[in-house]
Amino acid sequence: MTTISHPFDASSVLEGALRRPLKVVGVSGSLHEPSKTTVLVESVIEAVGRRTPIESQVVKLAEIGPALAGALQRDQLSDDIEGVLRDIEGADLLVAASPVYRASFTGLFKHLFDFVDQYALVGQPVLLAATGGGERHALILEHQLRPLFGFFQSLTLPLGVYASASDFDGYALREGGVQQRIEQAVSRGLPLVEQAAHQRVSDYVSTW
């Protein structure tokens, strides 16, 4: 029997990998459903999807919170929650959002990220977002969320998105300022996201 070997074409593999949709994972730290924070996360993801092909999902703490509350270590989590963590760790873009709760993000939001591997988010683009009752709570983006992902050595995108109660009509985002902030944050951040995804794929192919 004659075996015919085909040369490995790294450039073709790289080109194919780069054509895949970006994997975008949103995390809503809200403890309620329906949730203004979840609406904000979904709106950000939709804005990304209008610019480039994506595969997306939204992790809702209101849904998975009970499965987290009793666990102290990652190996105590269910297979479903382990899958959620792997999705977060493997995202091309993470949209991380929490309502302002007692001057910070919610406890379960932090508890979720306590289970994320310390080095899994190194260089991962993260778009920060938050909701709160008034404009003064917007400082959560810089004083709480950015330091958290700085610990993970993530690439926090230059602009975050904060939405106050006045930016909503019930559970729908109003037209105007908040929509413009979303568009601006995404348009300025997306080139960094695509560059990071390109580098990640290149690094992976180079190890073959």
Image (cartoon, rainbow, N blue to C red):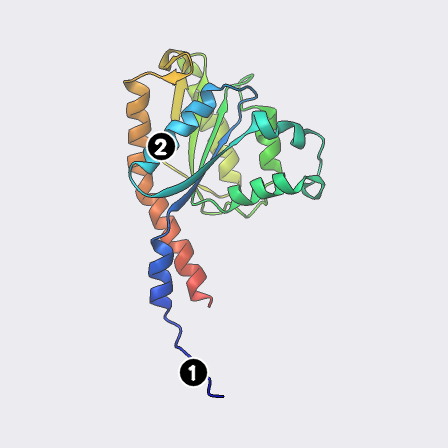
- The amino acid type found where label 1 is placed reads Ile
Residue at (35, 32) in percent of width and height = 46
Marks 2 and 1: CB-CB under 8 Å? no
Identify the secondary structure beneath mark 2: helix
98 or 147, which is in the foreground? 98
Residue that numbered label 2 is attached to:
46
Task: Tell me residue 90's x, y (percent).
Answer: 50, 47
Q: CA distance from mark 2 to mark 1?
A: 47 Å
In front of the other: label 2 or label 1?
Answer: 1
- In the rendered view, does 163 fall on the left or right side of 77? left
Residue that numbered label 1 is attached to:
4
123 or 50, which is in the foreground? 50
Where on the picture, by quarter, is residue 113? Answer: top right
- The amino acid type found where label 2 is placed reads Glu
Mark 1: give few (<14), some (14-19) or many (20+) Cα within 10 Å. Answer: few
Task: Tell me residue 163's x, y (percent).
Answer: 39, 19
Mark 2: give few (<14), some (14-19) or many (20+) Cα within 10 Å. Answer: some
Identify the secondary structure beneath mark 1: loop
Residue at (60, 30) in percent of width and height = 64
Residue at (58, 43) in percent of width and height = 83
